[in-house]
């Protein structure tokens, strides 16, 4: 793998995610405290925008299969900079919905094209490791950005937030410039008999993606369900909320790259998904037990549960990308990544509602146990579905 290309992409990713961390940490506060919008309107606009934005997944994935993904991604990030600046003009619900929908669509497109670019940079043998390295870089960038956002939050003025918005837009432009330093990548040629192949018509691949998407519902657990559970149902102090987030980030940074070395084939990715479902299920049971005992005991249980959760989460993320790479038809990585992103994105979008409206309201700890069973069962069925899907991939793709 050309390490200099991965290094360049790492700098682009770090720059991009510092800006994303800034905006993610301050977005809701800006619109509620500075713009003066009701929190429910802000939440509704972001949710609707995220769902509508998923529509760009498949078309952009197919374009990335036919064009240089480096140029496409650089162009997308330049557009993201323009959209990011327009947040300063938002003053009511409908303009917010319009801007966030544009922003979400570009973010989705960026993720899909990034997957095609990672595959081009890493090559067939190194793309999973390249993804893992960039995931660690992204985690660091998000953490740095979120920490820096504390300055704007502490000042709590329109000027402070406007500077933050300008910095976020600038990081998109810098990332775009860095991406242009990569060499041009020619699209992988499609075999003559694969010209009409589409991920949306590949039922076996869709089965794997849907099974994996059930495991992806864990996305709403740590940022939404765990904080509410800590405050409402445990004796742990509120600072435990920040503690579990730090533990999750630390474990992910340490374990992601080593774990990726074993997840380089469809079979390995399927086994990783099975372990992800099992570990996430175990962590759900442990989280439910934090309701018992003293504050110290609750914090200990929360740290243990989060450590297991973090390992399960990174196994899910790496296994998911491995499966979408290895099960893709030749010359159609972008198409398959886009389709997988669409299915996974729906799971991400409905997860917060599921956590708050169903799991948290379930009697006793029944919601936690329901999640545990769902994750474990979904992870367990992915290997069988993967074997069926792998049977239709031509040998060259299966061996990559």
Image (tube, rainbow, N blue to C red):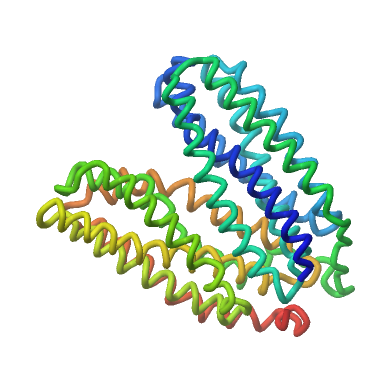
Residue drawn at the location 61% of the way across and 78% of the way down: 266
Q: In which quarter of the image is the C terminus?
A: bottom right
Q: Which of 340 and 320 is in front in this view?
A: 320
Q: In which quarter of the image is the N terminus?
A: bottom right
- The part of the image, by quadrant, that contains residue 104 is top right
For this view, does 33 lie left or right of residue 206? Answer: left
Residue drawn at the location 66% of the way across and 49% of the way down: 13
Relative to 165, is 49 above or below?
below
Instruction: Pinpoint residue 384: horizontal percent, then vertical percent.
Output: 51, 81
Instruction: Pinpoint residue 119: horizontal percent, then vertical percent.
Output: 73, 65
Asked whether residue 211 appears in the rendered view, the answer is: no
For this view, does 338 lie left or right of residue 281? Answer: right
- The part of the image, by quadrant, that contains residue 137 is bottom right
- The part of the image, by quadrant, that contains residue 5 is bottom right
Instruction: Pinpoint residue 342: horizontal percent, then vertical percent.
Output: 60, 53
> Total marks drawn?
0
């Amino acid at each position: 793998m050309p390490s200099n290309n991965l290094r360049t992409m790492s700098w682009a990713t770090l720059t991009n995610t510092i800006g994303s961390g800034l905006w993610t940490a301050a977005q809701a506060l800006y619109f509620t405290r500075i713009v003066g919008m009701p929190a429910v309107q802000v939440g509704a606009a972001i949710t609707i925008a995220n769902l509508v934005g998923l529509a760009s997944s498949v078309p952009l994935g197919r374009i990335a299969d036919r064009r240089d993904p480096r140029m496409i991604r650089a162009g997308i990030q330049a557009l993201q900079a323009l959209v990011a600046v327009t947040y300063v003009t938002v003053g009511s619900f409908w303009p917010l919905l319009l801007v966030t929908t544009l922003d979400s669509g570009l973010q989705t497109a960026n993720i899909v094209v990034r997957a095609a670019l990672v595959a081009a940079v890493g090559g067939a043998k190194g793309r999973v490791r390249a993804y893992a390295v960039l995931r660690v870089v992204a985690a660091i960038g998000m953490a740095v950005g979120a920490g820096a956002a504390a300055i704007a939050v502490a000042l709590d003025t329109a000027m402070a937030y406007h500077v933050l918005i300008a910095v976020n837009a600038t990081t998109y432009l810098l990332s775009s410039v860095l991406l242009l330093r990569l060499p041009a990548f020619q699209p992988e040629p499609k075999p003559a008999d694969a010209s009409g192949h589409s991920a949306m018509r590949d039922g076996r691949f869709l089965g794997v993606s849907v099974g994996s998407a059930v495991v992806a519902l864990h996305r709403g657990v740590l940022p939404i369900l765990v904080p509410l559970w800590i405050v409402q149902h445990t004796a742990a102090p509120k600072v435990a909320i920040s503690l579990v987030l730090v533990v999750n980030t630390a474990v992910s940074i340490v374990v992601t790259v080593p774990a990726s070395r074993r997840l380089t084939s469809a079979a390995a990715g399927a086994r990783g998904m099975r372990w992800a479902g099992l570990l996430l299920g175990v962590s759900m049971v442990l989280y439910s037990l934090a309701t018992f005992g003293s504050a110290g005991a609750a914090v200990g249980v929360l740290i243990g549960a989060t450590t297991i959760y973090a390992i399960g989460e990174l196994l899910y993320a790496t296994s998911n990308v491995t499966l979408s790479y290895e099960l893709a038809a030749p010359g159609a990585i972008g198409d398959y990544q886009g389709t997988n992103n669409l299915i996974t994105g729906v799971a991400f979008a409905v997860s917060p509602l599921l956590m708050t409206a169903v799991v948290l309201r379930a009697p006793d700890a029944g919601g936690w146990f329901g999640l545990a069973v769902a994750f474990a069962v979904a992870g367990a069925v992915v290997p069988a579905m993967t074997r069926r899907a792998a049977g239709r991939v031509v040998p060259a793709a299966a061996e990559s």
